[in-house]
Image: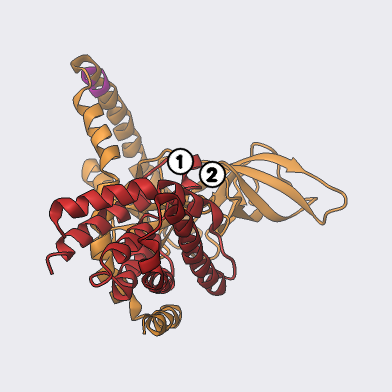
Amino acid sequence: MKAYTVILPTFFVALVLAIFPMPRMLDYIRPEWVAMTLIFWVLVSPSKAGIFLGFVMGLLVDVMHGDVLGQNALAMSLLAYLCMLLQSRMRLYNSIQQSFLVFVLVGLYLLVSFWVESIVLGQGKMALLWPSVGSALIWPLWYNVMFSVRQYFRA
Amino acid sequence: MAVFLSVALMLADQNLSTTVHLRSFLGLFITPVQLVSSLPAQLGDWAEGTAVSRTTLLDENKRLRHEGLILKQKVQQMVSLRAENNRFRELLSASEQLDDKVLVAELIGVDPDPYTHHIILNKGSEHGVFVGQPILDAQGLMGQVIDVLPYTSRVLLVADSNHAIPVQVNRNGVRAIAVGSGKLDELALIYVPDTADIQEGDQLVSSGLGSRYPKGYPLGEITTIEHDPGEPFAFVKAKPAAYLDRSRYVLLVFSKASELPDISFSVEQKASEEAE
């Protein structure tokens, strides 16, 4: 239970970062903060963070972006599942290899989200590639920040 | 399990109206996120307001007082003019035209998605905001509400490429449809015949057809017209009158057809109080 007093605030920060105003140009490569935070928690404590957490966070993202309910929830659940499959391998990787894997995972997350959106709206309006690149670039920094937060609170 | 749940939710959200409750419940968690993300801007505003010099404030105060006086005088004229107007309308046996009530809201966020033009306002269903409600700024029409949470709401701007609004040319009443181009400073008029009497510089106002936007609010000004003999319609571009990328305070319009909450600010009442 104590772990969640750290996990949930980090998701709050990630949600704020996800809608924080930025220059228009940077918007195109805005990292998927919530997805990255989910990957981190599944990676370091798979017993606490899993598919259900991904589902709930995805729902919050849906409401925040005004998308159809369930779009990001589905994509986040799948992301959490993939992470759980990969986590024992991913922990051994160095940060460049991890970044590459994050690029692929966030890309898949966006792809699923894009599929749902194009089914629901008849057209998808989001970019797939650039946010994944942004996420991969920021991943080593985010991983270290989150890791020291986790160490500090001993979650 | 989660996959089934998500798919079920998506179907429910598409076809049923009960997910509104779930949405507004989850919205309670999202509102603090939106408020925190708008903090730096609010802090900037506050600092600007606090650090301003005394003389500037005095100057501004004086200017505003003058402006207020001029406006008051105009309102006095308005009262008699409105009464006169109504008498004429009665003579023509037309229905009496009432003022629309408005509620002032503040912009607290812009959707980060670069492919859409949505903004977030700090008023929600608790304040009586409803889906489809028109939004104005001091210059003209801005857009309409598309999603309502308890304390915030999401607005689709007229420049979004998913938005269209029926308009009229103010000069001669020619009707057209203005769709967003995806660029904040450009609207396109579609299905305009080559022979239509539209000129550069013409003012566009909402026509009230489609009964979503109230009639007669300014939308923009025609900037360019191109006639291509090979195309069935003319290419007409317009520039929105509202400051879509600058306005911080906007007006939520309660047309007389819609429900009116107690907190809304009534221009007409103020005017009649002052006249007494």
Q: Is mark 1 on a helix, strand or loop?
A: loop
Q: Which chain is represented by red in the image?
A: A
- Decide whether residue A83 is among the magenta residues: no
Q: Chain B is drawn in which colour?
A: orange
- Residues A147 and B107: in front is A147
The picture quadrant where one finds residue B274 is top left
**Which quarter of the image is occupied by the N terminus of chain A?**
bottom left
Q: What element carries label 2?
A: loop
Q: Would residue A102 be found to the left or right of residue B20 on screen?
A: right
> Which x, y percent locates residue A120?
53, 73
- Residues B57 and A94: in front is A94
- Looking at the magenta stretch, what is its main secondary structure? helix
> Can residue B83 be seen in this snapshot?
no
Tell me: residue A134, above or below residue B90.
above
**Which quarter of the image is occupied by the C terminus of chain A?**
bottom left
> What type is the residue that disc 2 sits on?
Leu
The chain identifier of the residue carrying mark 1 reads B
- Residues B48 and B144: in front is B48
> Which x, y percent locates residue A45?
25, 66
Give the mark, 1 or 2, whose residue is nearer the N terminus. Answer: 2
Residue holding disc 2 = B184
> Which x, y percent locates residue B172?
65, 47
The picture quadrant where one finds residue B264 is bottom left
Label 2 crowd (10 A; few <14 / some 14-19 / many >=20): some
Tell me: residue B9, above or below residue B194.
below
The chain identifier of the residue carrying mark 2 reads B
> Which x, y percent locates residue B109?
35, 48
Residue holding disc 1 = B245
> What type is the residue that disc 1 sits on?
Asp
